[in-house]
Image: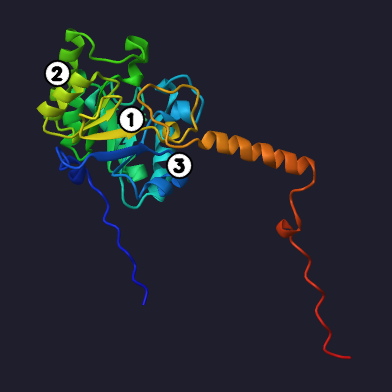
Amino acid sequence: MSVEQTVKPITVSDIRARKNGEPLVCLTAYTSLTAVLLDDHVDLLLVGDSLGMVLYGLDSTLGVTLDMMIAHGQAVMRGSKKACVVVDMPFGTYQESPEAAFRNAARVMVETGCDAVKLEGGVEMAETVKFLSQRGVPVLGHIGLMPQSVNQYGFRAQGKTETEAKRIMNDAKAIADAGAFAIVIEGTVEAVARKVTKTVAVPTIGIGASPACDGQVLVTEDLVGLFKEFTPKFVKRYSELGDGIASAAKQYAKDVRARKFPGPEHCFGMKPPPKSKRK
Ligand code: KIV
């Protein structure tokens, strides 16, 4: 008898319930292969629009389209059985109005089958977060350093001044009150992230926002040493897969040029002719 193990998927409610509990473990995934590798180890897989820079070589996340996010969301959903999967809403697909945001978010939810969407913004996005949350689209918020606003604020740590600290706190309160089930806090000074985490009733997920948060998220390609263009201060490398790939390619090139690869064990032989029954 085969005992098939049934996996209980982690839901948005499970994530919300982890406030002040065991820290949430979150990583980005853009492909089915990565989702398969990470799924057993994380609570949440984020199909982040960072894929624009990491996979497509763009300078920022601004050139990422809804179709790109949907294609990668579908791939991750094919590879994930357990993790709560959240897909980023790319720049320009939700800022115009709550109605436009709903139309695009509904496409993401229906076409990928993901659990929730993530969008950047605080007070100014609260109405949209409420509109989506009340209509069946769970929202993961994203405040502090917001890469889609790079042209306005740059890529620098947030919350260093009293004014910034107040803005971040107001942003967190506004989207938590609007119904976000959790909030990503990116690139924010520890004291502010700590205060926000103590204040809001939903889990905070930090990236460069200190261990005070209810969970942590990193870009997987940073974690494993595949993306080396730029390494933020808050990244810890747990592996050097980029070096491994480069050295495998170097060895392969050497073997092909020396006709050492493929070897006989990699070749298909011809079948021997069938034996005749008559003598
Ligand atoms: O796009 C992304 O990967 C993100 C994480 C860095 C939080 O938003």
**Which mark is first along the chain, 3 or 1?**
3
Q: Amino acid at mark 1?
A: Met
- Residue 128, given in percent of the width and then of the height, sits at 20, 26
- CB under 8 Å between callouts 3 and 2? no
Q: Is mark 2 within 8 Å of ligand 1?
A: no
State the CA–CA distance, disc 1 to disc 2: 22 Å
Find residue 115 and report its image quarter: top left
State the CA–CA distance, disc 3 to disc 2: 35 Å
Disc 1 element: loop
Query: Around disc 2, counting alpha carbons within 10 Å, would you say few (fewer than 14), some (14 to 19), or many (20 or more)?
Result: some
Q: Which residue is mark 1?
A: 89
Q: Residue at x 40, y 28 (%)?
A: 50
Residue 170: mark: 2
- Residue 45, given in percent of the width and then of the height, sits at 34, 41
- Examine the rendered structure and indicate whether residue 272 appears above or below residue 128: below
Find residue 111 and report its image quarter: top left
- Examine the rendered structure and indicate whether residue 131 appears above or below residue 34: above
Q: Is residue 46 visible?
A: no
- Residue 187, given in percent of the width and then of the height, sits at 30, 21
Q: Is residue 204 left or right of residue 28?
A: left
Q: Quadrant of the C terminus?
A: bottom right
Disc 2 element: helix
Find residue 26 and report its image quarter: top left
Q: Which residue is mark 3?
A: 31
Foreground: disc 1 or disc 3: 3
State the CA–CA distance, disc 1 to disc 3: 17 Å
Q: Amino acid at mark 3?
A: Thr
